[in-house]
Image (cartoon, rainbow, N blue to C red):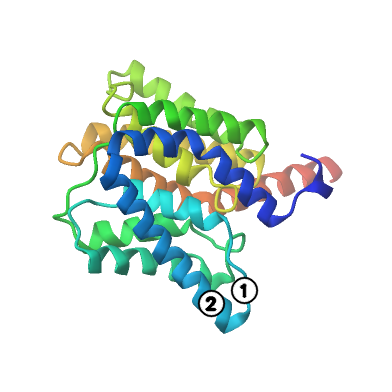
Amino acid sequence: MIRGLWSRETVALVLVLAMAPLAATWLMAMRGDGLLRLLSALAVVYGWQLIFLMIRAQPPSLAGIVTALAIAMLAPTGLGPVAFVLGASFGVVIGELVFGGWGRNILHPATVAVAFLGFGYPAAPWPDLAIPAAWGALGTLVVALAFGLYSMRLIGGAAIALTFAALAGLPVLDPFVAPAILAPMALLVCDPVTSASTQSGRWGQGLLYGGLVALFLGAWTSASALQVALSAALLANLAAPLLDELALLAWRSRRRRHHG
């Protein structure tokens, strides 16, 4: 990327465009129900952004579209409107806006929202993503890679771990499981703000996500595929700062040995 042409909102715009394949395949499968969930999530996200605009003159961000799409796609189903609005609000405010908005957050706000709803309403069923969503997620990953928004190392690490999982007989390539693995990866794990920023950290985060998916698929038999992938995504993103710190410690150690 040419640095002079990119601002925070330019990156957000390209990220929204990269989400088009995933959003299109999901909406075509879900039709009216999906559109209603997406519009509801958009209303919550931008409602809170407008409130924070009035409080601290913080402009709304196009990245809110990605947050709304992730919440609409990945949040448990069967929730009442109050529960859905409460969970989405918690994710947007606590996960992003209190840190100063998109680009300064530690975790993806949709990750916080979905985790809140999953823990708060454990009996609510997780959505089953349609098979075409896997192709849509792959399209999103390719577009984001082409524009330099996503890390090839992170995706490569996840691909390596998932390949070993497939060779071990785990159903990561099952057409009903693959969308549940790829959609959180495209929406949450590879997010350029909350993912690891060092080269080694990105490899580690990708390997961790794929490895946790494999571990949970093999051991957590009562969970749905999407619940497995979202749990792996949450833990992988929580580990990103630690992986970066370990990478920096290793770099400093090598530098001291080299100059010692």
- Which quadrant holds residue 47? bottom left
Q: At label 1, which amino acid type do we have?
A: Gln
Using a 10 Å C-alpha cutoff, classify the residue at mark 2 as few (fewer than 14 neighbours), some (14 to 19) or many (20 or more).
Answer: some
Using a 10 Å C-alpha cutoff, classify the residue at mark 1 as few (fewer than 14 neighbours), some (14 to 19) or many (20 or more).
Answer: some
Circle 1: element type: loop
Q: Which residue is mark 1?
A: 58
| 81 over 169 or under it: above or below | below
> Which residue is depicted at the point 62% across and 59% down?
103
- Which quadrant holds residue 180? top left
Residue 6: mark: none
List x then y, in percent, for residue 91.
40, 64
Left or right of 94? Residue 193 is right
Q: Nearer the viewer, residue 205 or 20?
A: 20
Left or right of 239? Residue 127 is left
Labels in figure, total: 2
Q: Extreme bottom residue here?
A: 55
> Which residue is depicted at the point 62% across and 39% down?
200
N-terminal of the two: label 2 or label 1?
2
Q: Which residue is mark 2?
A: 52
